[in-house]
Amino acid sequence: MKPFSLKAFPLKLGVLPIAERKTLRLTYISIKREGIEMPKWYEFELGKAADILTRELFKLKEGEVFVITADTESDERVVEATARAAFACGAKPMVIWLASPLGVGKAADPMLPIDALVGALRGADAWVEFNNEWLLYSTVYERALKENPRLRYLCLVGMNADMMVRCIGRIDYQLLGEFLEKITELTRNAREMRVTTPAGCDVTFQNPPDMRIGYSLGYADTPGSHMMAGQIGWAPIYETINGKIVFDGSVVPPIGLLKEPIELTIEKGEIVEVKGGREAIEFERWLKSFNDPNMFKLAHICYGFNPGAKLTGNIVEDERVWGCTEWGIGSFRGRPAATHCDGICLNSSVWLDGEQILDEGRCVHPELAELARKLGKQ
Ligand SMILES: [Fe+2]
């Protein structure tokens, strides 16, 4: 659709009565918006998704203060739908728009009004983050959660109308909860693991006996930090990770959606070789640029299982694509590094102590397969 042009709207406002000028201005704003984005795109579905977010996932109550943060790269439709739904719950929505920082997490700090943001969040009961250049792990995030122990935070960074409908509005939370609980339990009980993909991944590792493994179901009804539904993450015993990891989805940072695979050779949890084309060269240069040996160490693995997620280049969605595995590299709990990045391996096959549960992204474990089918994924 072509953007609205002033040339196509030559009327002079000054010659019209005030009431008509107002109508004309509203028409102009409406047409202008129509030119930039499709105003009806998922409008009804987005309303339902915002209702689920505020009423079900946040369990907002009458009188609660609900802060919505966004930046100038965020989707305004998502922000407005969420504010409307929160208001309809009887909560007090407060929308905070920020200039987009030139980085995420701590890298955003120099451009943020830190004290003002923390001040607002100290007075809030709940906070949803829609920022594209995210505040997660920034000083604002750390201080807000520390100084306001009742705060319920949900990370929905980079959210747009399309993703909100698919990944939040159309989810059967009861079923997905059962699925995530089951695969988490199976993985927690497994010691020896193997993961392969059609792109060439073939990696083995051991899980620690007292492993911390958790899944996100997207609820933010208890104090603390919460993530969007459909991801399960844990840290294997690093020294036992050996083989090939081939990223064929996205790598964030520094690349985004990949045009060609990047192959990593892993020995005892460390990247010893990076192979591929131009993007592999770029990725290796980026890792080396930090001059930090911990940037070549693996941090965690995750499964992606959000029934609505698709590969878009937004890492929050990509890492939830059904049947993918994700590897984190760099900083992690108890092991600082210059930064952290995540890479996606699509259509994973997974063996737990020799028993295959996933075959190229499809569940083959009978209980998981049944739940996946109900979720529309087989
Ligand atoms: Fe990660």
Image: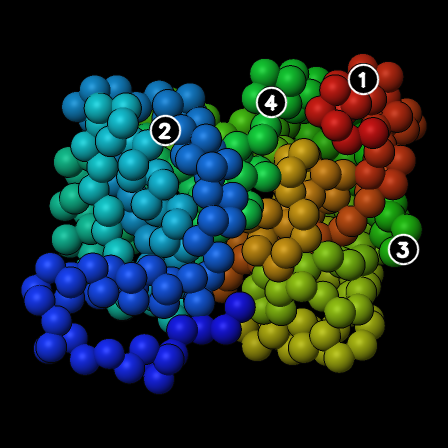
Q: Nearer the viewer, residue 156 or 137?
A: 156
Of callouts 2 and 4, the N-terminal one: 2
Render colour scheme = rainbow
Instruction: Indicate which disc, 3 or 4, sits on the residue closer to the N terminus.
Output: 4
Give the label on residue 200, or none.
Answer: 3
Residue shown at the point (29%, 31%) measured from the top left: 86
Query: Between disc 4 and disc 1, whose residue precedes?
Result: 4
Secondary element under disc 4, as helix, strand or loop, is loop
Tag of residue 54: 2
Image spot of residue 247 (x, y percent): 76, 58
Residue 191 as seen in the image, left or right of residue 146: right
Q: Amino acid type of disc 1?
A: Glu
Residue drawn at x 59%, y 39% is: 166
The answer for how far apart the CA atoms under marks 1 and 2 are is: 30 Å
Give the image quarter of residue 194. Answer: top right
Q: Report crowding for label 1: few under 14, some 14 to 19, many 20 or more residues within 10 A (C-alpha).
A: some
Q: Whole-Å distance between the Cαs marked 3 and 1?
A: 28 Å
Q: CA distance from mark 4 to mark 1?
A: 14 Å
